[in-house]
Amino acid sequence: QVQLVESGGGSVQAGGSLRLSCAASGSIISITAMGWYRQAPGKQRELVARITSGGSSNYADSVKGRFTISRDNAKNTVYLQMNSLKPEDTAVYYCNAAVRRDYSGTTYSYWGQGTQVTVSS
């Protein structure tokens, strides 16, 4: 099995910063991609940012220029640095990892438990 453990959420005023971390552990051969998604009350879960093992990244338009995703492949950890936070960034943030558990080529998707980010105006 594979576990994703997130940390770093909390409450901050608009304009502030937070840094989220997500560490993957368990039966892992490699992780092809890791990402952060978020879900606000009454809304669907949406992609925030994603990064491949090679370092290629993509972002939701709403966070470009404010959020930065990075990863430490040796530690199977992904980070999300969030700057200039806005009230509309308030949501539960979920970590996702695309994991290879064996040498068959199959990739499995795993999710963290979620961490709350609240931005007050």
Image (tube, grey):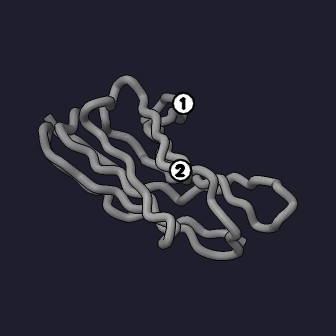
At label 2, which amino acid type do we have? Gly
The residue positioned farthest toward the front in the image shown: 54
Quadrant into which the N terminus falls: bottom right
Judging by the rendered image, the residue that carries numbered circle 2 is 54
Residue 50 locus on image (x, y percent):
49, 42
Q: Earlier in the sequence, mark 2 or mark 1?
A: 1
Left or right of 117 on screen, residue 84:
left
Per the rendering, the mark at residue 44 is: 1
Tell me the residue at 49%/46% (across/down).
51
- Depth check: 43 or 68 in front? 68
Label 2: few (<14), some or many (≥20) within 10 Å?
A: few
The residue positioned farthest toward the bottom in the image shown: 26
SS class, disc 1? loop
Q: Are marks 2 and 1 in contact (CB under 8 Å)?
A: no
- Depth check: 97 or 45 in front? 97
Residue 69 locus on image (x, y percent):
38, 47
Left or right of 16 on screen, residue 1:
right
At label 1, which amino acid type do we have? Gln
Label 1: few (<14), some or many (≥20) within 10 Å?
A: few
- Find residue 115 and report its image quarter: bottom left
- Is residue 5 positioned above or below 16 on the image? below
Residue 5 seen in render? no
Q: Nearer the viewer, mark 2 or mark 1?
A: 2
Left or right of 118 on screen, residue 72:
right
Tell me the residue at 42%/29% (across/down).
60
SS class, disc 2? loop
The residue positioned farthest toward the right in the image shown: 104
Residue 27 seen in render? yes
Residue 83 locus on image (x, y percent):
20, 42
Quote the CA–CA distance across marks 2 and 1. 29 Å
Tell me the residue at 81%/67% (across/down).
102
